Amino acid sequence: MTDRRLTAANARVAWRGMGDVPGLLAVDGVEAVLSRPVTDLMTAPATAPASRRDRQVLLGQGVLVLEDRDGWAFIRCADGYVGYVPSAALVAGVGTTHRVGTFATHAYCDADLKSPDVMALPFGARVQVVDERRHFYQTPQGFVPKRHLRPLDRPFASPATVAQLHFGVPYLWGGNSTRGIDCSGLIAAALGACDIACPGDADLQEAALGVPLAPDAPLMRGDLVFWRGHVGMMVDADTLIHANGHAMAVTYEPIATAILRIRTTDASEVTSRRRIPGLDG
């Protein structure tokens, strides 16, 4: 069965990378980047009755625009996910140099913390540094504190540490930022900050990430635990961090408690436990 989330085709066009699709115009796509801090990736243009948020894309994320029609762009993201964003949320492809490496930051009008702030940026947003001042980097969005930006060629080493940076973020179905996040969004943020390719949803992550662990194998920091439609990351042998609807936030929970609670409330058992080799926890 074709997975809608990863099928780079709509009723009119198909990405040429899919090969020949009868009846659809083959397109290479045009490179672009997101120009807003956080943009919903929709299943259809918002004018469509069944349109809903599937995931989110952040400032500076590069995408391929496969079609631009009636104010909505059909895009393919780097992780293969497809969907629709407002055309106004995209600009022509420009190189980015840094990512926001703190929970959040602001871009200011001037290199002065007392100057007006012009944009709030979440963790993981990407920017292009064009100039440097004593305490600020200048970007097209404004002046950002140096301490809040991290060069893209210096990825984080510990996905669990990145996940912990998101502690307390409110739960948001389909969310991918420190403004709001869901279970798979948390894993994608944690691994993406470490330059580890990661699909967008829990079922895709379970199929693609790491190697399976035996049911009785001891868990360690950075291991992933999957249920039907849910995923969390271990911060130590006994404690899980996950974005969950039970607390409506990113929280810590003893893994034994989480297993029992999910079994009781959702009639769901752990489907797999997976380890990504070579991580620094």
Image (cartoon, grey):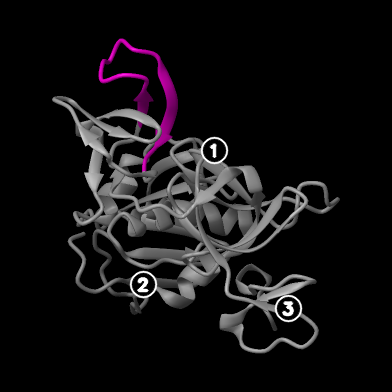
Which residue is label 2 attached to? 274
Q: Which residues are magenta?
A: 105-123
Task: Looking at the picture, tell me which residue is in the foreground, 12 or 280.
Answer: 12
**Label 1 sits on what residue type?**
Met
Q: Does residue 116 show up magenta in the picture? A: yes
- Looking at the image, can residue 7 be seen? yes
Q: Position of residue 14 (x, y in %)?
A: 68, 76
Answer left or right for 193 relative to 117: left
Inspect the image, locate mark 3, and give the three-letter code of the amino acid beneath it: Leu
From the viewer's side, name the closer residue of 251 and 60: 60
The residue shown at (50%, 42%) is: 35
Camera-nearest label, 3 or 1: 3
Instruction: Report which residue position mark 1 lands on.
Output: 248
Whether residues under marks 3 and 2 lie with C-beta atoms below 8 angstroms apart, the answer is: no
User: What's the amino acid at mark 2?
Assistant: Arg
Q: Residues within 10 Å of mark 3 (few under 14, many from 20)?
A: some
